[in-house]
Image: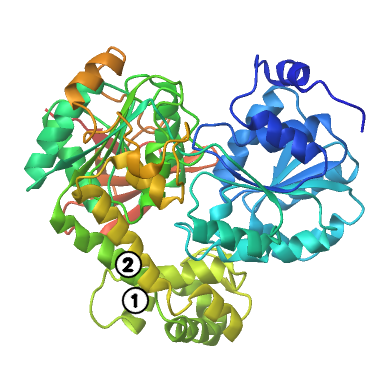
């Protein structure tokens, strides 16, 4: 391939005046046919490392990404620049998937995004046989590893997929990988001898702090103080939806109306809440850890964790979403020892035995045509004898779905495809995973409770023996955490002028009602809106009836309902 002026191409295609960090070195290596493990901090521009080679090199670049919303956003941004990129995933209609694949086969596309599950679709790999796969990129590569914080079974097949594609040069990219996870990535993707590029994890503009709290009232008071000091945009991460909703109510009493994002919202509500956060410069959003990946917002000024996260990897990935504009941002964990039981429970639920998973799979296989009527409560009643909120059933369903054993959604269009093999169950649920997960939680507790430089603790956790300037870890003090410098002094010197936190007016977009509205309906009487769904041009709501607190769902038809205005 002819020599390419990468700086000129960067400006022509993206409008950027220069590369950041190791971007150019990675791109030159990849264009030269090299594979690599790329470790870059959140916000350092990993995606450019595979995007630019796709548009200046020859052939097709295939990108594996874990989230459909993330790939949709990236493709939309590239197409806005008239760059030939597309994605193929399960949320598209069959004809649209076929249209996009045909464009790939004709050579009209240079960058194709897919989820790892796409390779299980019959005929997909065969359809790529006549296409020159010049490069492969595996984004969020920590998903390969059982010991990562977001394991996806289908990621472990990507080494085999790569071989079937002709072993193209491969970039494995992640922001959060311990030495153990890095080794697992290399083995799974067959990158044992690939070069490693690492920018480190230092973010000098992020201040890390831990605030010990004895009660939830202490947490609320501290959160309000942080919001006054930092303003918006800001994210508050909650481990449980019930705690998120309780905090929302308390903030409403304080005159703050936050946006919210969690798994009980409809897809429409999640999209509009995220869009509102993206668009506003004064927004506060309360969210579970489902929110954040794919949120391309540079000016987040504060990230607060209402409860302790499960691992340092997850924590550092989440706080890394702050301050991507280079200005100071404040990140604080509200640490209450009683909250540890939440994460201990999550660890139990995330680690069912292989035997438990096999029992559920056999039960679902035996349902036959009745499977489409099976609901989550029935599965819980069948397999759980104690805690109704035990999440092991949901963990098994997720593993079966991402492993290609289930398709569709429970209670709607669920289909049983095949039984998992004993080898698959052993691989998905290894015997020592629970112990490793508990050790990960212990590392998080030590970060929160020990009098050790916060960033030095994180630095050592990810296997760095030196800071970016070469100072040995044991001698290094960051100057950007509450144990190395005075918090108030750093805030005064580094935080931009607070914008304030305003009421969030963008609730559910164009929907005629929103979550929390009271309706008087002809059929059900008085009810409260729990979720709002978009169905083409129509709206459908899930409600809770005032008369008996039961749940119902109905379409919003003219003349059938009216909003009850609060006094």
Residue at figure coordinates x 89%, y 40% from the top left: 107
Mark 1, residue position: 380
Which image quadrant is residue 3 in? Answer: top right
Residue at figure coordinates x 41%, y 68% from the top left: 394
**Residue 265 in the image, given as x and y percentages of width and height:** 37, 47
Q: Is residue 321 left or right of residue 71?
A: left
Q: Residues within 10 Å of mark 2 (few under 14, many from 20)?
A: some
Q: Is residue 513 left or right of residue 433?
A: left
Q: Is residue 298 left or right of residue 514?
A: right
User: Which numbered disc, 2 or 1, marks the residue that appears first in the sequence?
Assistant: 1
Q: Is residue 488 above or below residue 131?
A: above
Q: Point out the image quarter for the C terminus.
A: top left
Mark 2, residue position: 438
Which image quadrant is residue 496 in? Answer: top left
Tell which of 302 and 19 is nearer to you: 19
Residue at figure coordinates x 50%, y 39% from the top left: 200
Tell which of 161 and 522 is nearer to you: 161
Q: Is residue 350 left or right of residue 99?
A: left
Tell which of 180 and 523 is nearer to you: 180
Q: Is residue 256 above or below residue 267?
A: above
Q: Point out the image quarter for the N terminus.
A: top right
Q: Nearer the viewer, mark 2 or mark 1?
A: 2
**Residue 92 in the image, given as x and y percentages of width and height:** 66, 48
Q: Is residue 506 above or below residue 442?
A: above
Q: Is residue 493 visible?
A: yes
Q: Find numbered disc 1 in the image and state the secondary structure of the residue it sits on.
A: helix
Q: Find numbered disc 2 in the image and state the secondary structure of the residue it sits on.
A: helix
């Amino acid at each position: 391939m002819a020599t390419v002026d990468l700086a000129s191409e960067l400006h022509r295609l993206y409008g950027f005046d220069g590369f950041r960090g190791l971007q150019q070195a990675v791109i030159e290596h990849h264009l030269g046919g090299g594979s690599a493990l790329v470790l870059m901090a959140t916000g350092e521009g990993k995606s450019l490392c595979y995007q630019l080679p796709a548009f200046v090199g020859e052939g097709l670049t295939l990108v594996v990404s874990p989230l459909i919303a993330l790939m949709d956003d990236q493709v939309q941004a590239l197409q806005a620049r008239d760059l030939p990129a597309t994605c193929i995933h399960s949320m598209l209609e069959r004809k649209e998937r076929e249209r996009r694949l045909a464009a790939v086969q004709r050579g009209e596309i240079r960058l194709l995004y897919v989820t790892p599950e796409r390779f299980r679709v019959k005929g997909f790999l065969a359809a790529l046989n006549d296409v020159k796969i010049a490069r492969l990129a595996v984004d969020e590569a920590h998903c390969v590893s059982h010991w990562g914080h977001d394991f996806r079974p289908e990621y472990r097949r990507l080494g085999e997929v790569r071989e079937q594609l002709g072993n193209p040069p491969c970039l494995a990219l992640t922001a959060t990988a311990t030495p153990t996870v890095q080794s697992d990535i290399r083995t799974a993707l067959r990158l044992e001898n690939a070069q490693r590029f690492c920018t480190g994890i230092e973010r000098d503009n992020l201040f890390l702090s831990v605030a010990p709290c004895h009660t939830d009232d202490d947490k609320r008071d501290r959160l309000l103080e942080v919001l006054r000091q930092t303003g918006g945009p800001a994210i508050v991460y909650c481990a449980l939806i019930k705690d998120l909703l309780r905090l929302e109510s308390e903030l409403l009493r304080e005159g703050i109306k936050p946006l919210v994002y969690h798994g009980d919202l409809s897809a429409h509500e999640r999209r509009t809440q995220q869009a509102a956060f993206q668009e506003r410069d004064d927004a506060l959003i309360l969210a579970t850890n489902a929110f954040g990946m794919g949120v391309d917002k540079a000016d987040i000024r504060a990230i607060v964790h209402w409860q302790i996260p499960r691992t340092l990897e997850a924590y550092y990935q989440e706080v890394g979403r702050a301050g991507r504009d280079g200005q100071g941002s404040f990140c604080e964990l509200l640490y209450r020892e009683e909250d540890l039981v939440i994460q201990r429970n999550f660890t139990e639920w995330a680690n069912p035995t292989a035997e438990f998973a096999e029992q559920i799979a056999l039960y679902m296989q035996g349902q036959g045509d009745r499977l489409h009527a099976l609901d989550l409560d029935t599965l819980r009643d069948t397999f759980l004898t104690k805690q109704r909120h035990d999440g092991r059933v949901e963990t098994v369903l997720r593993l079966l779905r991402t492993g290609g054993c289930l398709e569709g959604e429970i209670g709607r269009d669920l289909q049983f495809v095949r039984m998992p093999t004993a080898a698959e169950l052993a691989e998905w649920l290894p015997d020592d995973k629970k112990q490793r997960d508990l050790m990960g939680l212990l590392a998080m507790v030590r970060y929160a409770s020990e009098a050790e430089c916060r960033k030095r603790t994180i630095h050592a956790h990810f296997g760095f023996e030196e800071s970016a300037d070469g100072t040995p870890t044991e001698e290094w003090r960051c100057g950007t955490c509450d144990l190395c410098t005075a918090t108030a002094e750093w805030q005064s010197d580094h935080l931009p002028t607070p914008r304030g936190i305003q009421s969030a007016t963008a609730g559910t977009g164009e929907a005629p009602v929103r979550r929390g509205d009271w309706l008087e309906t002809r059929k059900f009487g008085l009810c409260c809106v729990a979720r709002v769904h978009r169905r083409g041009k129509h709206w459908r709501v899930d409600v809770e009836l005032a008369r008996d607190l039961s749940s119902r769902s109905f379409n919003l038809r003219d003349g059938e309902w009216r909003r009850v205005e609060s006094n």
